[in-house]
Image (tube, grey):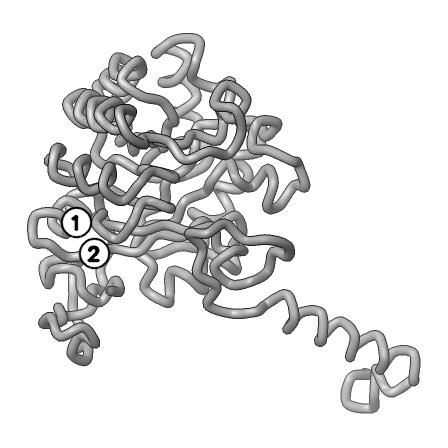
C-alpha cells in the first residue's frame, strides 16, 4: 500500500489516484499538511501510511514530494551519516542540526526527531528540556523516544508540555549493549511484555507506537491492543505504517542488509558510475568542455 491510500480527509486537498493494485478501493491522494490526527484516521479507517528517515534537505524534499507521510530524523544518522558504529554517540546538538535541515525542506510530511541517547533518561524534566529544543531549534513536529512501560511517566510529562510523542519499543538500538546486540525482541513468552509496554505508553499519551524487530504475531497483538496507530520496521505487515532507513531502501548503503529491508533502487551503483565517469572525463580533459566555461 502507499500514502495514496490514506483516507480522503487526510490533508487539506485531494487529487485522484488510480485503483489500488491489491483490489481495495484507493482513496484520493492527500495534498495538505500531515498531522498526528491524520495518522489516527489511518488506523481508524484501516488504511496505511509510509515513513522514511531523512537527514538532509534534498532527501527530505524528494520524499516529501513523493508523498511520504512521515519523515523521521533518526538518531540512525549516527551510523548512516556520521560514520559511527552505533547510534549511541550522536548528540542532541547534532540531532537539532539534522532536524532543522529536514524541517525546512518538508512542506507536507510530519517531521519526527529521535531523542538521542543521554538526552532523556535522567528524568522527565530532562526529556522535556531536550524535546523543547528539538521543537524550537530543530523545528520538528514531534519526538520519538525509545523505552518501554518504565518511561510512561516521561511520556506523560512530554504530553503535558504539549509535545507529541512517538513511542519506540521492541528492539531499541540505544539499548543494544543491554540487549546483547541486534536481536529480535518479543518472541515466545516475551511477546506479552511488548504488548504491555505498548499499552502503557499509549495510555500515557503517545500518539503512535513504533515496533522494531519483533515477530509479526507480536506486532499484530500490539496493533489490536492499542487504540493509536502502530509503525513497523521488521515487524510484519499488520501495522498501520511502515518505516525504513532511506539509505537501505534506496540501496545507497553497501554490505549485508537486514532481512526486513526491501531495496527499491541501487543508488550506490548509480553514484559510483557517475563518479567514475566524471573522473574519466577530468583525466581525459573532456570536462569542462566549451559549454561549461564562461
* Left or right: where 275 falls relative to 95: right
* Left or right: where 140 falls relative to 10: right
Query: Residue 38 got which mark?
Result: 1
Can you give x and y, in whole percent of width and height, for residue 106 in the image? Answer: 40, 54
Query: Residue 14 got which mark?
Result: none
User: Dot 2: what SS?
Assistant: loop
* Left or right: where 85 falls relative to 128: right
Residue toward you, 247 or 140: 247
> Which of the two marks, 2 or 1, is nearer to us in this view?
2
Q: Quadrant of the N terminus?
A: bottom left
Q: Earlier in the sequence, mark 2 or mark 1?
A: 1
Residue toward you, 274 or 241: 241
Q: Is residue 104 visible?
A: no
* Left or right: where 168 falls relative to 78: left
Compared with 172, 126 (above or below) is above
Give the residue at the far front of this rendering. Answer: 188
Give the residue at x 36% y 32%: 143
Give the residue at x 45% y 64%: 62
Give the residue at x 78% y 84%: 292
Can you give x and y, in whole percent of width and height, for residue 235 in the image? Answer: 32, 44
Residue toward you, 253 or 93: 253
- Circles 2 and 1, Cβ within 8 Å, touching? The answer is no
| Mark-to-mark CA distance, 2 and 1 | 11 Å
Can you give x and y, in whole percent of width and height, for residue 19 in the image? Answer: 15, 78
Query: Residue 48 got which mark?
Result: 2
Amino acid at each position: 500500500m502507499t500514502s495514496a491510500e490514506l483516507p480522503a480527509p487526510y490533508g487539506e486537498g485531494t487529487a485522484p489516484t488510480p485503483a489500488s493494485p491489491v483490489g481495495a478501493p484507493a482513496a484520493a491522494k492527500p495534498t495538505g499538511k500531515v498531522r498526528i490526527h491524520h495518522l489516527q484516521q489511518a488506523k481508524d479507517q484501516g488504511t496505511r501510511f509510509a515513513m522514511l528517515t531523512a537527514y538532509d534537505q534534498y532527501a527530505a524534499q524528494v520524499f516529501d514530494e513523493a508523498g511520504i507521510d512521515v519523515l523521521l530524523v533518526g538518531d540512525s544518522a549516527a551510523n548512516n551519516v556520521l560514520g559511527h558504529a552505533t547510534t549511541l554517540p550522536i548528540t542532541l546538538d547534532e540531532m537539532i542540526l539534522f532536524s532543522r535541515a529536514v524541517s525546512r525542506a518538508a512542506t507536507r510530511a510530519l517531521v519526527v526527531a529521535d531523542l538521542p541517547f543521554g538526552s532523556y533518561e535522567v528524568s522527565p524534566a530532562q526529556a522535556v528540556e531536550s524535546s523543547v529544543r528539538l521543537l524550537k531549534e530543530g523545528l520538528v513536529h514531534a519526538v520519538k523516544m525509545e523505552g518501554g512501560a518504565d518511561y510512561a511517566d516521561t511520556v506523560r510529562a512530554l504530553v503535558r508540555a504539549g509535545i507529541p510523542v512517538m513511542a519506540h519499543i521492541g528492539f531499541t538500538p540505544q539499548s543494544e549493549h543491554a540487549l546483547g546486540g541486534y536481536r529480535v525482541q518479543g518472541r515466545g513468552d516475551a511477546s506479552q511484555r511488548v504488548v504491555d509496554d505498548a499499552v502503557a505508553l499509549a495510555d500515557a499519551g503517545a500518539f503512535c507506537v513504533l515496533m522494531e524487530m519483533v515477530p509479526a504475531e507480536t506486532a499484530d497483538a500490539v496493533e489490536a491492543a492499542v487504540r493509536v496507530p502502530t509503525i513497523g520496521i521488521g515487524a510484519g505487515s499488520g501495522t498501520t505504517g511502515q518505516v525504513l532507513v532511506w539509505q537501505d531502501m534506496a540501496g545507497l548503503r553497501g554490505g549485508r542488509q537486514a532481512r526486513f529491508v526491501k531495496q527499491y533502487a541501487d543508488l550506490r551503483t548509480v553514484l559510483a558510475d557517475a563518479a567514475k565517469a566524471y573522473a574519466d572525463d577530468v583525466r581525459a580533459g573532456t570536462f569542462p568542455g566549451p559549454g561549461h566555461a564562461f
